[in-house]
Amino acid sequence: MTLSRRKFLIQSTVLGCSAAASPLLTPVTLAAAPGDNRLVVIILRGAMDGLGVVRPSGDADYARYRPSLAADNDMQDLDGFFALNGALKGLMPLWHAKELSFVQAVSTPYRDKRSHFDGQDLLETGSDDASGAPKSGQTGWLNRALGLLPDARQETAFSVGTARMLLLDGAQPYSSWSPGADLEMSPQTEALLAGIYADDPLFASSAEMALDLSAKTESMAGGRAGNAKALAAFTAARLNEETRIASFSIGGWDTHNNQNRNLARALKQLSDAILALKSGLGANWQRTTIMAITEFGRTARENGSGGTDHGTGGAMVMAGGALNGGHVFGQWPGLGELDLYQNRDLEPTDDVRRYLGWALRDLFGMEASALGSTVFPGVDMGDNVGIIA
């Protein structure tokens, strides 16, 4: 006797797990956003040091401010002025293929207080409140953007991970997946599940990916993902169906001490995630843009612990086949004493929200005027920044 998927779901209590509550085990209809383009937003929690990731080697002040950090010589030249941290050298083939770019000297409007909590809130809400003070009823900028998409439904957008994503909070529907105990099954149960879905490639693939993600992903604290590669692989699986927008977080960027080691560890997670997305997406990689953003940058000068402290201007990392790659975008302000913000930080010369806005416009056809008023209130969209091919 063949046990159908329908009968399995009806009798799922036998398995000791709530299969009907899992979006991976319940037959669902995904809704497509207009077109075939895909967007992945990765929140880098902890304030990534943009100067250490995209090093301004051509600026003599860098080595003067950072004598021990500059001793890391495994840098990969990008354009003769900027060099990429060696921990990301696995991404250099993407750079040469025009599938990797960066933006230097950008920030949100957040200034001076340099609190992770307020900075991340402002990054995810897209607010123009420079204080970053949380407000009741705040919604995420990506959720507001969904409101500009016709026919956006439950799984047009997907949030992956156990950390709450303020980025997607709001009135527009989205789906989420949190790895954890919901998919803890005995080997017998896993075998039964595999048999039931053996003739259904979509559900077999999703179930296998979910079980692998649950097994590999360690507990997350403060948004720190234990296995970004597994999260990215699961994300790619959803994007290969009808999901078009996805987001997840990678932690570990608060490098107050021993930065060369700790930053390399976080960058390895990011590199693994990007490469897993490329591998998992297959041909859909050519229609995908990844935007990795952080709450603020770090100080221009290293501290006495071989690290850097909370700063202002920072960098964005972008990848994907839809990208206008092979560029370091942004206006470089310089690191001279008079060029620094408050004589300590990289001076921001552009708004990170403007780059996000133009990506949404070019990928999904959203109106620039609506992006500047509804999605990112107060931002001056200006001319197209040209990050999408």
Image (spheres, rainbow, N blue to C red):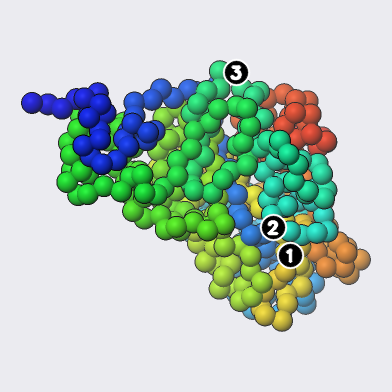
Secondary structure category for the residue under label 3: loop
Q: In the displayed orientation, state which residue is furthest to the top.
A: 151
Identify the residue shown where x is 62% and y is 72%.
259
At label 1, which amino acid type do we have? His
Judging depth in this view, the residue of 97 and 227 nearest the camera is 227
Side (left or right) of 197 relative to 297: left
Q: Are marks 2 and 1 in contact (CB under 8 Å)?
A: yes
Write down the residue under mark 3. 150
Q: Are marks 3 and 1 in contact (CB under 8 Å)?
A: no
Element at label 1: loop
Q: Which residue is mark 1?
A: 310
Q: Amino acid at mark 3?
A: Pro
Query: Of discs 2 and 1, which sits in the foreground?
Result: 2
Q: Is residue 190 left or right of residue 277?
A: left
Position of 358 relative to 351 (above/below): above
The N terminus lies in quadrant? top left
Point out the frontmost of discs 3 and 2. 2
What residue sits right under mark 2 in the picture? 116
- Give above or below for 373 relative to 317: above
Q: Give the class, few, some or many, for how many residues have Cα within 10 Å of label 3's Cα (few <14, many ≥20).
A: few
Locate residue 262: give its quadrant: bottom right
Q: Residue at x 78, y 31 (%)?
A: 372
Location of residue 318 with respect to 198 vertically, above or below: below
Label 2 sits on what residue type?
A: His
Mark 2 residue crowding within 10 angstroms, few (<14) / some (14–19) / many (20+): some
**Sequence-earlier tag: 3 or 2:** 2
Residue 380 screen position, x and y as percent: 83, 36
